[in-house]
Image (tube, rainbow, N blue to C red):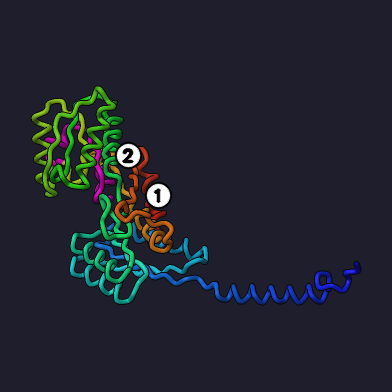
Amino acid sequence: MDRQGSKETSPYYDVKATGYIIIVFLLVAAGAKAKEISIGIVARGTNTEEKLTQSGALAAAKEQNSRGDNHVAIDWHVALSTPEAVLAIRDMARRKVDGIALAGYDEETLQTAIEVQRVNGIPVVACGGAGPLPGATAVLGTNNYACGQQLMEALAKEISNHGLIAIFGGDYPGNPYFGPRVHGAQDKAKDYPDIQIAAVTYAGPDPRDVAARMLNVSTAREGLGGWVMVVNWGLPSTTSYQSQPGPRVVTVDPGIEMGIRQLESRQLQALLVQDFYGWGRQSVLLLADKTLRPKEPENNFIPFGTTVVTHENVERFLETLREQLANE
């Protein structure tokens, strides 16, 4: 059968069909406008830690915008008090932002944000938590048990896997951040048969109290070779302590700048730094992309690791820090 004049082979039909396809494509492309997403972030300070979180958030927004799927705008608000943070969260809810991230928070701030999520349907991500939080979309924070293990590994390296050590456990054993770090350190110490834990001691965040506790333990335990500090709340600074080699000390922020100074002065041998930049970046990715959020609301904690900074790698760490802060 001669098919020269059929639709399937007609040059006229091909041009017409091609034109139709182009028109449809243009209509679809015109409708495929990037979705506008506004994410509000409430920070409880302006120090390096908050700046790193901000920089990570901005980096994630740039990443999303470069892909063209979404256009993410970051509404960054610094609140230096709880009432100011609460007002900022309520204002963001009034303006109907698409998501809220908390870069540091207290109980009242957190509960305000969770209430906004419940009433207004605005997802909330909390940065710096210790575990799952009912009512929030996600919680980003340090794996504190693994952090304690890392502290013990760092101290073991400093004392050549041998000696008598002590642990400073923060303010009280039940603290949800510090308790798991103590347990992680204790469990990891079992891998070093020549390391003995002489004491676990506690004190509040007053550096004078911390120094007094540590000096008392050091005096009572002759030959003490090292300290695991699950939080950097102040190191002994008396003349008698500084004039001697003293125990080796490893700790965790807060206070990146202070920790770096302590490293450089050899008062501190290792500093574990939490992933503030990663918290900011991941919070924006979670709020911009629903598929990345935890599937189980009751298991909404996303753990992050820490970076071990020592005399050997401090310059490299500072270079990374400068690169991360470039977005801020």
Q: Residue at x 23, y 25 (%)?
A: 195
Label 2 element class: strand
Q: Residue at x 58, y 76 (%)?
A: 30
Q: Quadrant of residue 230?
A: top left
**Magenta span:** 236-263
Residue 42 screen position, x and y as percent:
28, 65
Q: Quadrant of residue 202?
A: top left
Residue 85 screen position, x and y as percent:
23, 67
Q: Quadrant of residue 251?
A: top left
| Left or right of residue 67: residue 148 | left
**Dot 2: within a 10 Å radius of its alpha carbon, few (fewer than 14), some, or many (20 or more) residues?**
many
| Left or right of residue 33: residue 152 | left
> The residue under label 2 is which amino acid type?
Thr
Q: Quadrant of the C terminus?
A: bottom left
Q: Eyeballing the image, is 120 above or below 291?
A: below
**Dot 1: within a 10 Å radius of its alpha carbon, few (fewer than 14), some, or many (20 or more) residues?**
few
Q: Eyeballing the image, is 315 above or below 129?
A: above
Q: Quadrant of the N terminus?
A: bottom right
User: Gap in Å between the C-alphas at discs 1 and 2?
Assistant: 14 Å
Whether residue 118 is visible, yes or no, is yes
Write down the residue under mark 2: 310
* Residue 252 among magenta residues: yes
Residue 301 screen position, x and y as percent:
31, 51
Q: Eyeballing the image, is 262 above or below 185?
A: below
Q: Does label 1 or label 2 sit earlier along the sequence?
A: 2
**Residue 319 circle label:** 1
Residue 141 screen position, x and y as percent:
30, 51
> The residue under label 1 is which amino acid type?
Glu
Q: Residue at x 24, y 62 (%)?
A: 44
Q: Residue at x 14, y 49 (%)?
A: 205
